[in-house]
Amino acid sequence: MAQAQYTKRLDEAIALATDAFRDKVRKGSGIPYVTHLLQVMVFVAEHGGDEDQMIAAVLHDYLEDIHDAEASDLEARFGPRVRRMVEALSDATSQPKPPWEERKRAYIASLREEPAEVKLISVADKLHNALSIRRDFARIGVAIFDRFSASQDQTLWYYESVVVALGEGWQHPLLEVLRAEVTAMVAESNAAG
């Protein structure tokens, strides 16, 4: 009989994510938001993440985007390590959220100091976002940036800054994929005006 690769904790985390994000879609695309959460989890699992990292990956936006979400609930259900990772991956946990630039600068500053286990999830998150932006950019051009609360220049600055922050004291093949995607995203955006 084959040995289980994960426990029912992962089942519970996926169920929590699918329930909590049931009514949410990715900005301007109509694609169910849960697809992003699952893809981030898949990237993490495919690149050596353990069960706690997979759980944190599928719940990485939970504290940030779900109105009544509580970090203490995550800890009670999934343990202190998952709670700490999800908190580290959240650029805001209060409502209303602080202004965009303030949140992003704080996230970038903290990301530099995060351990590899958190950086792996962050790179998976940002990679899926960058891939989605480039896919939609090919379809609708610079109008893709109208979906975001930040301007085109701010969005590109953010992704470039995240790549630098992730690279401080950490190397990973997935980071190199993200670096290439962000470089291409910036070049395509600049070429389009």
Image (spheres, rainbow, N blue to C red):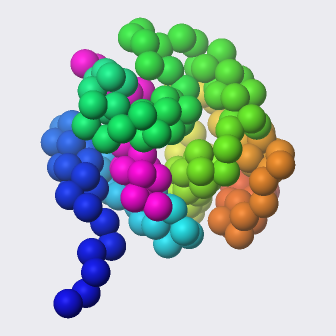
Please state if 131 lies on the left or on the right of 9 as rendered: right
Query: Splitting the image into 4 quarters, where does residue 94 fall?
Result: top left
The residue at the far bottom in this view is 1
* Residue drawn at point x = 55 percent, y = 26 percent: 91
Which one is nearer the viewer's eye here, 152 or 22? 22
Which one is nearer the viewer's eye here, 161 or 60? 60
- Is residue 179 shown above or below 55? below
* Residue drawn at point x = 70 percent, y = 29 percent: 110
Query: Splitting the image into 4 quarters, where does residue 88 fall?
Result: top right
Q: Main secondary structure of the magenta part?
A: helix
> Does the magenta portion include 58?
yes
The image shows residue 144 at horizontal and vertical percentages of: 53, 45
Which one is nearer the viewer's eye here, 111 or 101? 111
Please state if 116 lies on the left or on the right of 179 as rendered: left
Which one is nearer the viewer's eye here, 63 or 127? 63
> Does the magenta portion include 114?
no
The image shows residue 65 at horizontal and vertical percentages of: 36, 28
The image shows residue 179 at horizontal and vertical percentages of: 75, 59
* Residue drawn at point x = 26 percent, y = 48 percent: 13
Q: Can residue 116 be seen in this view?
A: yes
Please identify the quadrant where the N terminus is shown: bottom left
Count of numbered tags: 0
Please state if 5 lies on the left or on the right of 41 as rendered: left
Q: Can residue 129 be seen in this view?
A: no
The image shows residue 138 at horizontal and vertical percentages of: 56, 62
Q: Which stretch did the figure color magenta? A: 50-68
* Residue drawn at point x = 37 percent, y = 50 percent: 55
